Amino acid sequence: MNLANFQATPIQKICREINNNVIYIKRDDLYPISFGGNKARKAVLFFEDFIQNEFNCIVTYGSNKSNHCRIIANIAASMGIPCYIISSAETYHPTINSKMVTMFGAILKQCPISEVSITIERTLNELIARGLRPYFIQGGGHGNIGTQAYINAYKEILDYEKLSRVYFDYIFLTTGTGTTQAGLVCGKIIHGDERKIIGISNARKRAFGKKIVLDSVNSYLLSIRKKLIRIDEIDFIDDYVLDGYGKYNVQILQTIKETLLHDGIPLDPTYTGKGFWGMTEYLKKNKIFNKKVLFIHTGGTPLFFDSLEELENE
Ligand SMILES: *Cc1c(COP(=O)(O)O)cnc(C)c1O
């Protein structure tokens, strides 16, 4: 697989305005490997690090819906690298992503959710004992390398603004493990910009989620010797989490249907559909009008197809 020098993903204005705000979408779902998305953008940098440091197998983890696991398994397979995926057994009904993980020949280790970290540790130790050099990637591609991927994406946004003379007052995204948001916030700080970057949480509650984004931002800023930021500089919204990861409502399904129907852009119920719906509610609730708003489409296209039947019936 060729992982070098991809062009910027497109930014596209959608035909509907929300609360008189003009909405643009950065199509990171079109990032050109393995059905795209933020995990693909991050994975490219992780594999650069993997190759540079001469590791020879990969260990990571994620749920049955994980886009991260699909992409890591895909790239690993293309390079003939053994790939170990650890996943909690409780929720493991097959999804399109998990079927692809199996298809790519990844070695799937299922365990109770409370044993995920010990299973990771055991797997790493076993591989080391066999004389291998395992490369561990945190779930969702967390860490400074993942953050770097979205500093790069932020630069693409700046380049677009310069060329099009459209300036975004707000950037919204669905936030999960927090690295994507951390990268955008770091990008904003590095370039000295003022706008709001608002993460709509798809699972985590505010206190924990916000702290992780802050830690990720500061860990990166520390690594480049920049001044650290305070917790109140992170906008992390948990009003639209509903009952947690993977839980959605009728409005989310309607948002997905509408966005596909009017704009030809697929969203999914676990990540981008939830974030886009949350953004819509947030703009209304906070009486935000007449702004230019950019939503980062973080991918997850296979999850759209998991929900297709339900969308049909909606
Ligand atoms: C993982 C994921 C997110 C959340 O990104 P984080 O960097 O983990 O916060 C958002 N959207 C999609 C489609 C994802 O797969």
Image: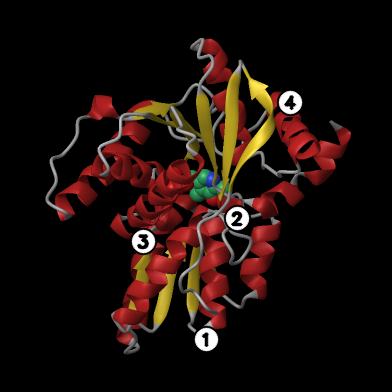
Q: Which one is earlier in the sequence, the residue at label 2 or at label 3?
A: 2
Report which residue position mark 1 lands on. 80
| Residue 277 vertical position relative to residue 162 in the rendered view, above or below | above
Residue 286, given in percent of the width and then of the height, sits at 48, 12
State the residue in front, 314 or 86.
314
Distance between the Cα atoms at labels 1 and 4?
42 Å
Q: Is mark 1 within 8 Å of ligand 1?
A: no
Q: Does the CB distance between marks 2 and 3 fall below 8 Å?
A: no
* The C terminus lies in quadrant: top right
- Marks 1 and 4 close (CB-CB < 8 Å): no
Against 44, residue 219 (above or below) is above
For this view, does 194 lie left or right of residue 257?
Answer: left
For residue 185, above or below residue 133: above
Q: In this view, does 68 lie to the left or right of 219?
A: right
Q: Name the residue under label 2.
A: 64
> Within the image, what quadrant is residue 278 found in?
top right
